[in-house]
Amino acid sequence: MATEIKMLTPQPVWEYFYELTQIPRPTGQMEAITQFMVDFGNRLGLDTQKDAVGNVIIRKPAAPGFENRKMVTLQSHLDMVPQKNNDVSHDFTKDPVDAYVDGDWVKARGTTLGADNGIGVAIAMAVLADPALQHGPLEALFTIDEEVGMDGANGLKPGFVRGKILLNCDSEEEGKLFVGCAGGADLNISFQYKKGAPLINGDVPVRLFISGLKGGHSGIDIHLGRANANKLMFRFLKEAVRDYGVRLADINGGSLRNVIPREAEAVITLPKDNVEVLWELVADYQDLYRAEYAGIEDNIRFVAEMTDTPDTLIPEEIQDDLINAVEACQNGVASMLHDFPGTVESSSNLALVQSSEGLIEVKILARSSSESRKTALLSALESVFALAGARVEYGSAYNGWQPNADSPILKVMEQVYEERYGKKAEVTVMHAGLECGIIQGVYPYMDMISFGPDLKHPHSPDEAVGISSVAEVWEYLKSALANIPVES
């Protein structure tokens, strides 16, 4: 309920967060949210600007007595990942998110919540609106279209941002201070053919559907070993094609490059005499997948049903090459960091496999905090699909953010944390991509750190943000702002 969320502590943060849930803001649909932010800044009487790509910056003068402090930039992104459960009717371009309180968590009914990165936006808004806070000169940078291509950060120009210190509010574990992140790059793969193959007389059409997977963020959740719907589907298809005369007519698996695929659908044909054994094979694979992912995935569903006859089939040689390449494709964790035990260094996400007339597209996002390892991983993935005869192109890429052991803001944040909680904060790096590396490329003088409240399962309908952790981060941020060092 709206009232329940807006009464949470700290109340200003939750009031602003609720307002954000009412504004549709999937990546690529930024007009309404950027106008909302411009109106917000103007309503406060603060210096508010929007750059050529749509990023918004709002500047607030220092509190009395803090005028000589270094200028701080609070940074968050405005867009959210649009994911919903299959049985939920929701249009992310016009429908508000249905958020609710569940114990110590705020969640959404059947869709992503948008706390990634709406809670960071709401915290920055609360800082801008509070006249009683102690802080030096500050600005809040709200970037657009982070989730697909980091377009806002990539569009920043020198001079738009003035801060010397960047506090990124897009990390998702309260009590951790992030000082680095992985870079990433897309592989766009295509199998092209001029004409589909004719149907085989006597064969019948069947629709296969895998669903019920948890999915999640392809960076911060990749180490959890969750199932990838594309990998499950093609594992099945290889046996079905080899042993039961199955032909592939259509395939559609996954959605966004940074989301672990939760669903995959295929239309196949096969000899009528093999239909009954196909039902048994599907049931066997469902049991197999549930056993293999016991304790990780709770509700894997694999079903088959009769469907409409397709117009044509994917040519057999293209079908076989595609199946073999997807089967061989590296997916998941590729290497771990030695300096930060338990942290993924490199990974890949087989994000999307989609067919249309004369074309099959495959999209993969590779991540690594090591540029050389990222290059090697991309080369290996390229080789697999090149051997299968596909066209492989490199898409958008972004640099990682390298840790700075001598970071002055890190020392401040560590000291404030220890004084508040009587223990040391955990300093680490993130396998997900943050905008810090890109921003640092434009503003190399900026000293950066990332922190935030607890978020569970971003990029999936199970997304949730911790209520008590938001309160902790709010108080921590206020203390940090009051302890920013003076301008040298």
Image: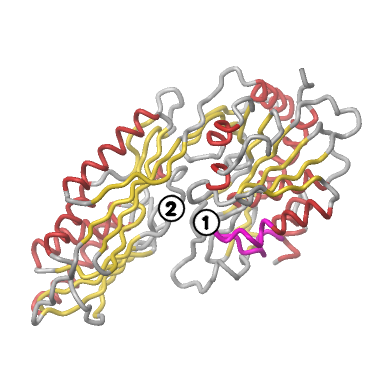
Stretch in magenta: 19-34
- What is the three-letter code of the residue carrying label 2? Val
Between 366 and 421, the one lying in front of the other is 366
Dot 1: few (<14), some (14–19), or many (≥20) neighbours within 10 Å? many
Q: Is residue 61 above or below residue 326?
A: above
Percent coordinates x, y for residue 466 in the rendering: 63, 49
Q: Is residue 341 above or below residue 35?
A: above
Q: What residue lies at 17% left-to-right and 50% top-to-bottom?
A: 388
Residue 128: quadrant of the picture: top right
Mark 2 or mark 1: which comes first in sequence?
1
In the rendered structure, the answer to whether residue 36 lies left or right of residue 343 reads right
Percent coordinates x, y for residue 313 in the rendering: 18, 71
Q: Which residue is mark 1?
A: 81
Quadrant of the snapshot with the N terminus: bottom right
Q: What residue lies at 88% left-to-right and 41% top-to-bottom?
A: 132
Q: Is residue 467 above or below residue 168?
A: below
> Do labels 2 and 1 touch, CB within 8 Å?
yes
- What is the three-letter code of the residue carrying label 1? Val
Q: Which residue is mark 2?
A: 259
Q: What residue lies at 28% left-to-right and 65% top-to-bottom?
A: 355
Residue 463: quadrant of the picture: bottom right
Between 145 and 245, the one lying in front of the other is 145
